[in-house]
Amino acid sequence: MTEPELGMSEKELKRYGVLERLKAGGVNQEGAAKELGLSVRQVRRLLRRLEAEGPAGLRSVRRGRMPNNRISEARRQEVIALIRAHYTDFGPTLAAEMLATQHGVTLSVETIRTLMRHAGLWKARRRTVRFHPPRMRRPRRGELIQIDGSPHDWFEGRAPRCTLLVFVDDATSGIQAARFVAAETTLAYLELVGDYLTRHGIPQAFYSDKHSIFRVNNGEKPSSTQTQFHRAMDELGIECICAHSPQAKGRVERANGILQDRLVKLMRVAGLSSWEEGNAFLPHFLEEYNARFARTPHEPEDAHVPLDSRTHLRSILCLKETRKLSRQLTCQYHQQWLHIFAPKGQERRLVGASVEVCTHLDDSIDVLHQGRPLSYEFLNTRPQPPVVDAKGVQAMSARHRKPAAHHPWRNPALYAASQHASDQNSASP
């Protein structure tokens, strides 16, 4: 048995050992083929090459040759120049996509990663891995929708900082709705919920954090145990669940991280510089995002309930507050004064009555009493309370106590005569 030549790989050394055993009769061709994972025919070829050329015949004939798919140095420099000019802070995956769509340069992600790493444009991040017990996905689409707001400099100074509201389906990880808003507010969430219900139907539950929009916090002294958002969802039959940690709603948190990287850079490439342009860009972006990142649910049945045409979303997706009317049929509402015009003959019945003031998504206001709308007007100044005596009877104002021009008080002679006649009448039997 001759010693094998240097420069052979472990795979080739293993083949050499098995073929030597085959030559010595320690194993037959079928056994050698099974041990090497080759066909009997290939074992015969290798055996003939070993006998003709020795151990060197088992070496790969491509060793030392350039690979057919090798990128030329000029091509490498061209790609690196494009990345330096346009995609310096992009990751390899997104950079490969942009090079293919914007410049017609089709290279694999790993090739782009290697080029960026050698050029000093990308470095692998060390991530701290923390263990959190996994939670199984809901089997059907629409069973659980994770909602969250992500405040961020989405337009990198080209527009004011804003918040992106994101609705992610738990079963598919697909983003079902998103919108740029000024901040996380109840009205902003209700408006996006209205769009979601119109497009997809009514889900079974919303999964959120413990923001005061979704839960009455213990540190406050609320007049109600429900927030406006929770009250509206109860009227729609949607369960509201508050997560105890960000990891519990990890699907929407991960989506926010992807959006803060991918969406920000794509809007920069597209030259978007306002919230309106961003909201117009979102539908096309979400379509591509879901095609790439969403997964198929375990069960094909959709858990959304179709929206009933009789459901009046305008009267549900609004802010509802109760006010008590004064004697003058007025009430205070958010530093404003409302004067109610009572229907004819119902003025006394509305004094002290409770009315419901509804602020709609378009900032219009309705005042309802027992479900019926009432007309109203805004007052510029605070209404003056009526003067009431000790018996609770409304007294006449000073303007009404001023005597008229023909009153006897204005003529002393007539006043004296009237007093004398009154004394005579009282003295007569």
Image: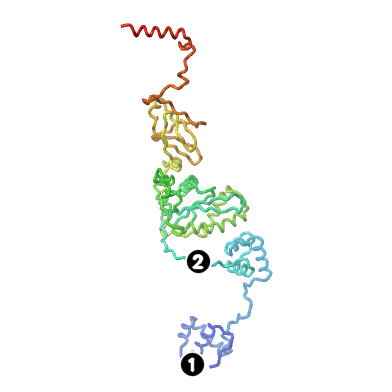
The answer to whether residue 202 shows anywhere in this view is no
- x and y percentages locating residue 12 in the rendered image: 54, 84
- x and y percentages locating residue 407 in the rendered image: 46, 12
N-term mark: 1 or 2? 1
Instruction: Give residue 24's mark.
Output: 1
Instruction: Give residue 6's mark.
Output: none
Q: Nearer the viewer, mark 1 or mark 2?
A: 2
Total numbered labels placed on residues in the image: 2
Q: Residues within 10 Å of mark 1 (few under 14, many from 20)?
A: few
Horizontal relation, residue 174 to residue 56: left or right: left
Find disc 2 in the rendering and name its residue: 128
Which residue is located at x 47 percent, y 33 percent? 338
Q: Residue type at mark 2: give it.
A: Thr
Q: Residue furthest right?
A: 74
Which residue is located at x 52 percent, y 53 percent? 150
Q: Element type at marker 1?
A: helix
- x and y percentages locating residue 344 in the rendered image: 41, 25
Disc 1 to disc 2, C-alpha distance: 55 Å
- Relative vertical location of residue 208 with respect to residue 406 in this rendering, above or below: below
Q: Residue type at mark 1: give it.
A: Ala
